[in-house]
Amino acid sequence: KDWAWQYLTSLHWSLTQLTPGSMDVQPQNIPERAVAVMVLVLGLVVFSSIVSSITAAMNSLKSITARYNRQRWVLRRFLREQGISPELITRVTVYSDNIIKPRLREVSLSDVELLKLLPRSLYMDVVLELNDQDIEVHPFFRALHVTNRVVMQKVCNVALQQVVLSEGDVLFSLGETAHSMFFVKSGEMKYARLRHNHTWEREQLEKKHWFCEAVLWTAWVHQGNMRANSDSELSAVDSLKLQEVCLNHGAELPIARRYGCAFVRGMNELILKGDHDDGVHLSDLLQVQSAMDLLPKYSMPINWFG
């Protein structure tokens, strides 16, 4: 017979060894029968393992979906009983379907119980690698990671928080006291600042942009409004907690002192050089290039331990 028939027959035989199938090719002697039995047992184990894995995954997905549907029904019932407007109910349910439901299928840090049993230093290393890529787009945090990994660990574990916004949500408004510096992880933010001539200056911020850096180094009041232009996720560095970490390692962090002083000095110089009536340099998007120029130019963290 031609090669195509032989090839398909061989393929058919190999598949029947891993599934409950059968065919007309049979063992003709004791060694062939022994091999067929061993392959059949192995195939039974492999096939059962695959089926059980698929079944477990499907049951887990059904459980998550059923739990979410139940909570969604309870949420809608609660909102209706409390007389919430239909428009707001629609916004809440749309956010729940688009943001919360996909997150339920992901494994969060709090769900991994074994991580809580790790030594503190090892746990902090895990949290550091989970978050450093989000804030090290800023040269200061990149340099901090290189010069003092321990401090960067504490920043990610103590001072860093995650903020989730739906489209249209307001992060802060003009005149509010600032508490955190923000990094855009995903989505798009829109910043609007009212100039002294009563015109609005607007700017879009996307992934890897940061804003409100000034609050880390001085008292700061928001100079404009920040709103989510789409469903967005941010990383927020709490200024008080960052200052606490830096104070606890003051002798080891000359880089923080130099950069903070240079930032405030550069900010004051920009304000003095600008138009005092317009206040053009006062913005939550303020960046001081002269301070960044003082930082070492590192591209990757150094492995001090080999």
Image (tube, rainbow, N blue to C red):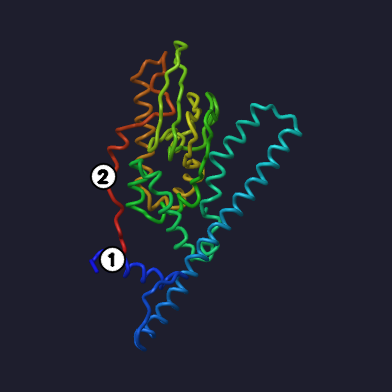
Pointer 1 residue: 5
Q: Position of residue 163 (x, y in %)?
A: 52, 40
State whether residue 30 is above or below residue 258: below
Q: Residue 283: where, in percent of width, then height?
A: 42, 25
Residue at label 2?
297
Q: Residue at x 52, y 23 (%)?
A: 174
Q: For the N terminus, which image quadrant?
A: bottom left
Q: Marks 2 and 1: CB-CB under 8 Å?
A: no
SS at mark 1 in the image: helix
Which residue appears at 26% of the width and 44% of the height?
Answer: 297
Whichever of callouts 2 and 1 sits on the residue coming sooner in the sequence is: 1
Q: Closer to the camera, 172 or 282?
A: 172
Residue at x 36%, y 75% (from the top left corner): 25
The residue depicted at 35 percent of the width and 40 percent of the height is 259
| Label 2 Cα neighbours within 10 Å, binned few <14 / some 14-19 / many ≥20 | few
Quadrant of image for the C terminus = bottom left
Q: Is residue 225 above or below residue 290?
A: above
Give, as a three-letter code, the residue at label 1.
Trp
- Residue ranking furthest to the front: 1
Q: Position of residue 125 (x, y in %)?
A: 42, 58
* Above or below for 171 versus 70: above
Residue at the far bottom: name it. Answer: 30
Q: Secondary structure at mark 2?
A: loop
The CA span between labels 2 and 1 is 65 Å
Between 294 and 230, the one lying in front of the other is 230
Which label belongs to residue 22?
Answer: none
Amino acid under disc 2: Lys
- Classify residue 29 as left or right of residue 221: left
Query: Residue 13, percent across and down?
Result: 36, 71
Please tell me in which quadrant of the rendered image residue 4 appears: bottom left
Give the residue at the far right of this rendering. Answer: 81
